[in-house]
Amino acid sequence: MDPNLFHVDQERLLEVLVAVIIMSFLLERVLALLFESRFFIKHFAKRSLKELIPFIVCAIVCVLWDFDAVSMIFLKESTTVFGAIITGGVVAGGSKAYIELFRRVMGIMSTAEKERIAIKEAQIEKAKK
């Protein structure tokens, strides 16, 4: 393929990003039922299942729904299982990263959050002087 023909469709990229964020929020809340349960905390809190379980669940969900963000962004003819598993890993990464993306990179945040950051920055400047 000619590299000069490569183009990422920004509208499609935004749609895929929004879908990943929504799926991440939904699956994070579903898995919170398990991870915040007394049973899990009592029996499994000291084991490293909190990273493995979300990855497996998210990968399975992405494979079952044929949700392959990589193939959607880079315009492949069909979705792949490998791409869906990669997408599952991204979804399992959680919503915290996406919140940071919106806040820090894109500057999208509530007025209260903007005020909190302004107060924090003023305190840092005051401490420097």
Image (cartoon, rainbow, N blue to C red):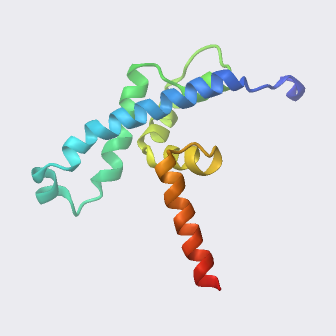
* Position of residue 110 in the picture relative to residue 39 (left or right): right
Viewer-side residue, 79 vs 11 = 11
Which residue corresponds to the image point at 45% horizontal and 49% vertical from the top-left?
Answer: 96
Which residue corresponds to the image point at 54% horizontal and 53% vertical from the top-left?
Answer: 114
Q: Is residue 55 above or below residue 16?
A: below
Q: Position of residue 42 (x, y in %)?
A: 11, 59
Which residue corresponds to the image point at 30% horizontal and 44% vertical from the top-left?
Answer: 53
**Residue 94 shows up from this direction:** yes
Q: Where's the N terminus, which quadrant? A: top right
* Position of residue 60 in the picture relative to residue 77 (left or right): left
Viewer-side residue, 65 vs 114 = 114
Q: How many marks?
A: 0
**Residue 71 shows up from this direction:** no
Specify the quadrant of the image occupied by residue 46. bottom left
Q: Position of residue 33 (x, y in %)?
A: 20, 41
Q: Position of residue 86 (x, y in %)?
A: 51, 36
